[in-house]
């Protein structure tokens, strides 16, 4: 299997990596209780054996597609009792995939118990792939702590599906069948190239291109109650839209209000949100950790946000069209074409122009299929309970914020990742507060409208 060519998306993320803007995700697990360190480390080593991209490096050769190189005996060393920054995270650095695998792990002390922080290169996995890996890790830990009584066991890993990662169900036949639909994708690509999205915040000082900011990662969080989360789902159903449609609409409204209050830009500026779309099918449930995701891009101006109902209808119509015409594949197909052009994918990642205003990722309900027992809806793994988890997604040049939303134990959690070189803690908190206030207004308005 190894050496193995990178997929187009893996290569894009590898080429777009840079010291000042690491293409890595930071993931924090917060437990109640103290982890048994030897048992956790042993479970982590087992998990690395099951998920090969955790231990792989990249080999580059001039004129050739980068390749994954396996290191079957490698596993990360957990750095216990690591210090944290003011956001509660371990300060992380750039990872060079050509020199070492893209996985680092720290253990820290939290208010209720231990915390574990992972830094994993985005070329190795998307957030949903990471969840599959974490589920294996916690299940393996539980088996080591509680013993094997037959009620729990690690599932078999499907390596064949791993070989089809990226776009596992995109065969030559399905590509031919959707070719006429991709004409709409070409129209969207034309708009993508002709419009220049505006950064969220205003101009910044010169950036040190050799390292991320010392306080990286910088993440602010907020959470809805269980009752509010259920009300948000009910609000989407009553309006015949998705929860993601509502969250996208409300983020556009909050970002526009935030920019207006801070006198940033103008009403004609295009704000571009990148929305990841999962490409997995049920057959991929036991594939090893990898990327099987694409992105679509939603552009709106401040003037488009003056009528919130019309804005919601437009977002819902656009997302429905994308799903109906399978335009979630357009981005990956464009990377496939770019790979064969002069300069290849790397040429498309050069420069520091603003390509995106913000990420907007909704992971839905996480760990909903885990076989682990639960305490008040939270996973119990051996002697600890997973109280909460956070996902910090990478930021790109002139992209000053990213939002990731997930639901765990029946509560919707919002994490806002900010670039401290452009957005202060106070300004970031103001943006998050505006967003949460808008979400709660959506809930109240739905309740007021009634059935």
Image (cartoon, grey):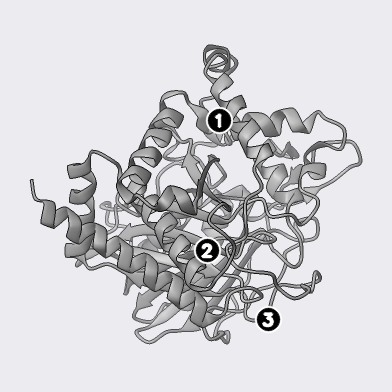
Instruction: Farthest residue to the right: give it.
Output: 62
Q: Which residue is mark 3?
A: 214
- The residue at the point 49 percent across, 67 percent down is 260
Relative image position of residue 105 (x, y in whole percent)? 58, 70
In this image, 184 relative to 60: left or right?
A: left
Task: Point out the image quarter for the C terminus.
Answer: top left
**237 relative to 356, above or below:** above
Residue toward you, 205 or 214: 205
* Secondary structure found at label 2: helix
**326 relative to 92, above or below:** above
- The residue at the point 52 percent across, 73 percent down is 262
- The tag earlier along the polypeptide, 2 or 3, is 2
Q: Which mark is residue 44?
A: 2
State whether residue 7 appears in this view.
no
Foreground disc of the pair 2, 3:
3
Foreground disc of the pair 2, 1:
1
Occupied quadrant, residue 213: bottom right
């Amino acid at each position: 299997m190894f050496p193995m060519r990178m997929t187009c998306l893996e290569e894009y993320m590898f080429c777009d990596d840079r010291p000042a803007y690491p293409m890595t995700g930071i993931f924090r697990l917060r437990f109640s209780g103290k982890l048994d360190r030897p048992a956790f480390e042993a479970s982590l080593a087992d998990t690395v054996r099951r998920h090969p991209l955790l231990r792989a490096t990249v080999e580059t050769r001039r004129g050739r597609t980068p390749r994954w190189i396996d290191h079957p005996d490698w596993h990360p060393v957990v750095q216990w009792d690591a210090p944290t920054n003011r956001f509660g995270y371990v300060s992380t650095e750039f990872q060079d995939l050509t020199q070492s695998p893209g996985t680092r792990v720290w253990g820290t002390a939290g208010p209720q118990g231990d915390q574990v922080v992972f830094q994993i290169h985005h070329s190795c996995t998307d957030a949903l792939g990471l969840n599959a890996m974490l589920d294996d890790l916690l299940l393996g830990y539980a088996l080591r702590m509680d013993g094997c009584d037959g009620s729990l066991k690690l599932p078999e890993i499907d390596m064949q599906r791993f070989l089809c990662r990226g776009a596992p169900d995109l065969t030559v036949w399905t590509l031919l069948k959707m070719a006429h639909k991709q004409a709409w994708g070409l129209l969207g690509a034309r708009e993508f190239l002709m419009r220049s999205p505006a950064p969220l915040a205003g101009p910044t000082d010169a950036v040190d291109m050799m390292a991320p900011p010392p306080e990286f990662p910088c993440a602010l969080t907020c959470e809805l109650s269980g009752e509010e989360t259920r009300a948000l789902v009910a609000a989407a159903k009553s309006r015949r839209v998705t929860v993601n449609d509502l969250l996208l609409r409300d983020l556009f409204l909050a970002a526009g209000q935030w920019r207006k209050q801070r006198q940033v830009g103008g009403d004609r500026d295009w704000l571009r949100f990148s929305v990841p779309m999962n490409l997995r099918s049920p057959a991929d449930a036991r594939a090893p950790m990898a990327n099987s995701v694409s992105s679509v891009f939603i552009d709106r101006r401040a003037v488009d946000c003056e009528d919130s109902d019309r804005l919601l209808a437009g977002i819902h119509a656009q997302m429905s069209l994308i799903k109906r015409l399978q335009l979630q594949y357009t981005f990956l197909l464009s990377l496939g074409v770019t790979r064969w052009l002069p300069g290849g994918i790397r040429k498309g990642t050069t420069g520091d122009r603003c390509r995106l205003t913000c990420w907007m990722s909704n992971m839905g309900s996480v760990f909903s299929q885990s076989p682990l027992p639960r305490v008040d809806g939270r996973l119990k793994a051996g002697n600890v309970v997973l109280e909460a988890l956070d996902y910090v997604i990478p930021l790109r040049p002139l992209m000053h914020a990213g939002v990731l939303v997930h639901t765990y134990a029946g509560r919707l959690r919002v994490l806002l990742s900010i670039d401290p070189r452009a957005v202060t803690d106070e300004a970031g908190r103001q943006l998050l507060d505006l967003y949460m206030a808008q979400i709660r207004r959506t809930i109240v308005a739905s309740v007021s409208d009634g059935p």
